[in-house]
Image (cartoon, rainbow, N blue to C red):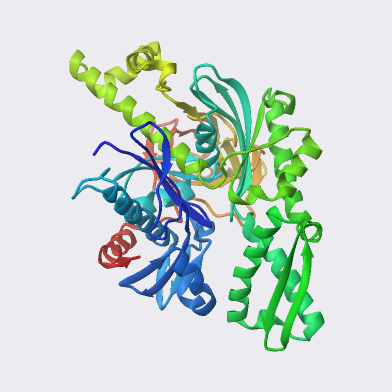
Amino acid sequence: MSYVFGIDLGTTYSCISYIDEYGKPVVLKNSDGDHTTPSVVMVESEKNIIVGTEAKRSIEVEPDKTVQFIKRKMGKENDVVTLNGTTYHAPEISSMILKKIVNDANEELRQTGVLKDGESIKDVVITCPAYFGMNERQATKAAGELAGLNVLNIINEPTAAAISYGVSGSDKNETVLVYDLGGGTFDITVMSIAGSDISVVCTGGDDQLGGKDWDEALMEYVVERYEEENGEDLSEDPETVAALYVDVETWKKALTSREKVNISVNGSAGRFREELTREKYEELTCDLLNRTKNLLDDVLATSEKQGYPISRIDKVLLVGGSSRMPQVAAMIERDYHVTPVLADPDEAVAKGAAIYASNEKAYNDFVVDEAAKSGKSIEQIKEENLVTGEMDKKFALTTGGAASGALKINITNVLSRTYGMEALDTDGQRKIFNMLMINDKLPATKRKDEFATVVDNQNMVSIKIYESRSTDEIMEIEDRCPITEIEMKFKQGVPKGTPLVMNMALDNSGILHIIAEEQLNHSKLDTTFQLSNQMTDAEMSSAALRMSSANIE
């Protein structure tokens, strides 16, 4: 089988896409006949896992067995949930969602004859928010591996959406802003398009902001109004609250296309009914919309500093189901004088990932063939291409170039976080000295030579690496925890004040590389490292064993 697949692993809904025989991206249906699957998991037992619509219904009656919005925990320090007495890490829960959508896609592809008996989906590109840091990206990859998938790449959701919309191509030359408001996360990305080259200018967002928060605001209002009318606090009844969340989401969606909706709540103290207008709903959620506007202003300010003011932005694409809310487009038109485009908000990300995956596979297959013909190694050909671009040109000519859309898609990303290391300042205070800064182009590298040992006969240093969204070169440690700590041992003790040269580099795949050298005896450290907040090898093995024996429906 020669197919590769794009997966949008969403906070509230997930879906999978591939390029069909006509060269079109197609989102595959799940067992319910829907293109998207709720990212909700219910653990009936370790051996029986329910994912999707049925699990979402179970939130009402069995909340202790059910989890949603797991994406918000990916790569975080406290990433565990306990369901039906068993503790799971967030990547394992996400792997269950992946397994469900892949199993359903396998079934559809077999029924349509695309897959033969014994064949199954293996090679995938998975998307993540643009502002995800290293921990979150690694957790996403781990989820794919636990689901038995070969994760070819993790690409940013806004970039995938832009690819799906068709912003790349030989005749394209424009600047695009993607406003991506999903169910649980929000990000903004400005990217410059030159033909098939997509260069991210800057990015920002909030992984704790999304449609769920609009639900919470409406939920709070309904609970308050019920208590005013009936004298009972609904929030004290977990089952009633779980059922009400389903209703709240329904009312929110209805107000996307209607000016008003009738809401009705049944509680032990009686029934409450009220007509809710879109105007009232937008009043209740205006603070949340303003949070997205403030983040958008920050990104636009950064974009302008890099030579891309809003006057240079040719398109604003709205992505993510929550961007359907009329208040979003109205805010952008009112405050930025740009008419945004609602770009297939539910499926664009998966389709774009599939287009990118297919393009990468076609190019890599082409390089393998060229290597075989020339007698050169694949690495040699790729190195030569970096200098001459000859292979990219040949690929375009061989495949029909712009006429077939087969130009190689090249993505240049930026850092979504700032990375620094702990050291003492001139006053002897522990501080974080940032080296790689948010929105630096990838691959990124930085050298600092102002560090030194702090005691006589020092025989090692502990290098603590921090991740943040700061733009300051020096910052307070406060309650921040390092994402990793590396011990560098010296050949022998050195005097106080011995210079230390530190180099930090981050490549396109998100691997952080540390090179350090003390300048007396020239002891060296040259390493990549294991991130904190990741599942250990033992935890991965245990999770893989559970996954292999579980029935996931």
- 320 to the left or right of 406: right
Camera sees residue 429: no
The image position of residue 416, as x and y in percent, is 56, 40
Camera sees residue 423: yes
Total marks drawn? 0
- 38 to the left or right of 429: left
Instruction: Point out the residue furthest to the bottom here.
Output: 269
In the rendered view, tell whether residue 5 sits above or below residue 499.
Answer: below
Write the residue at 47% across / 37% down: 352
In the rendered view, tell whether residue 475 sits above or below residue 220.
Answer: above
The image position of residue 195, as x and y in percent, is 51, 19
Write the residue at 41% across / 78% down: 85
Can you say which quadrant of the picture contains the N terminus? top left
Write the residue at 30% across / 38% down: 3
In the rendered view, tell whether residue 490 sits above or below residue 275.
Answer: above
State which quadrant residue 228 falls in. bottom right
| Nearer to us in this view, 204 or 193 | 193
The image position of residue 481, as x and y in percent, is 55, 55
- 18 to the left or right of 110: right
| Nearer to us in this view, 400 or 440 | 400
Can you say which quadrant of the picture contains the C terminus? bottom left
The image position of residue 380, as x and y in percent, is 27, 18
